[in-house]
Amino acid sequence: MIDTNKKNRLSSIFLFQTSSIIFTFFIIITPTGSALGSSNNAATSLEDTGRKLVLTTGCNDCHTPGYIIANGDVPERDWLIGDKVVEDITIKAVYPVNIRLYLKGISEKGWIKMARTKERKESMPWLILREMPDDKLRAIYRFIKSLD
Ligand code: HEC
């Protein structure tokens, strides 16, 4: 004989369990759903990472005309188009290339290989790029490609 109280308790336990199962199911499927969302999102977030890396590793400092003087206030469409920079120590001019143009002739694989093997001669910080994991180099590549 089950009294009403016990019945109520049992049904709330049942309800609780059911809702936890639904909740857990929801948690499990939600990330999968968004991951499946679209490959466009993945591409965009790789480009976003690349944008942040370009900003934080100083590519604009040398490769974007007027970037330092403007305190970084240069529209993205004008980034990385190349410049002439006079190095302080040697007082000789160096020419940070137009990276956007440069990367047109280089595959993603080629870019990663280049970053791993180039030796530093002028101020170009190859040693920073050499230490960067592949996915970060790929992100920089994708972002710079997306500028055109
Ligand atoms: C301190 C200044 C400076 C910074 C910062 C800098 N570069 Fe450079 N970069 C140069 C100079 C100078 C050259 C030309 C000499 C050379 O190739 O080493 C160059 C050349 C290059 C080249 C052409 C290489 C070749 O073989 O001709 C690429 C590609 C490039 N830079 C990408 C980048 C990227 C990406 C960043 C940001 C991670 C960056 N640079 C940051 C100064 C800089």
Image (tube, rainbow, N blue to C red):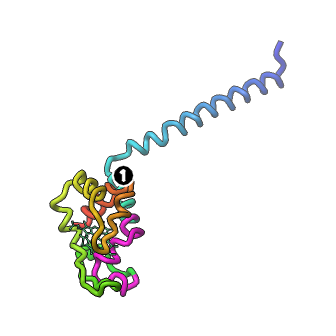
Q: Is residue 71 above or below residue 13?
A: below
Tell me if residue 32 can be seen. yes
Residue toward you, 121 or 76: 121
Q: Is residue 83 above or below residue 54?
A: below
Task: Report whether 70 appears left or right of 10.
Answer: left
Residue found 36% across the figure and 63% down from its top: 127
Look at the numbered disc 1 and give the secondary structure of its residue.
helix
Residue toward you, 120 or 125: 120
Q: Which residue is mark 1?
A: 135
Quadrant where the C terminus sits is bottom left
Q: Is residue 8 above or below residue 41?
A: above
Residue 74 image offset from top left, x and y in percent: 33, 80
Q: Quadrant of ligand 1?
A: bottom left
Specify the quadrant of the image occupied by residue 139: bottom left
Residue found 26% across the figure and 85% down from its top: 92
- Is residue 59 shown in magenta? yes
Specify the quadrant of the image occupied by residue 62: bottom left
Q: Residue furthest left?
A: 105
Residue 37 image offset from top left, x and y in percent: 38, 45
Residue toward you, 135 or 142: 135
- Kindly identify the amino acid type of the residue bearing the numbered disc 1: Asp
Q: Is residue 147 above or below residue 132?
A: below
Q: How many marks?
A: 1
Task: Report whether 102 appears left or right of 89.
Answer: left
Residue found 30% across the figure and 71% down from its top: 124
Residue 138 image offset from top left, x and y in percent: 31, 55
Magenta residues span: 53-71
Task: Report whether 17 appears left or right of 117.
Answer: right
- Is residue 65 shown in magenta? yes
Residue 87 image offset from top left, x and y in percent: 31, 83
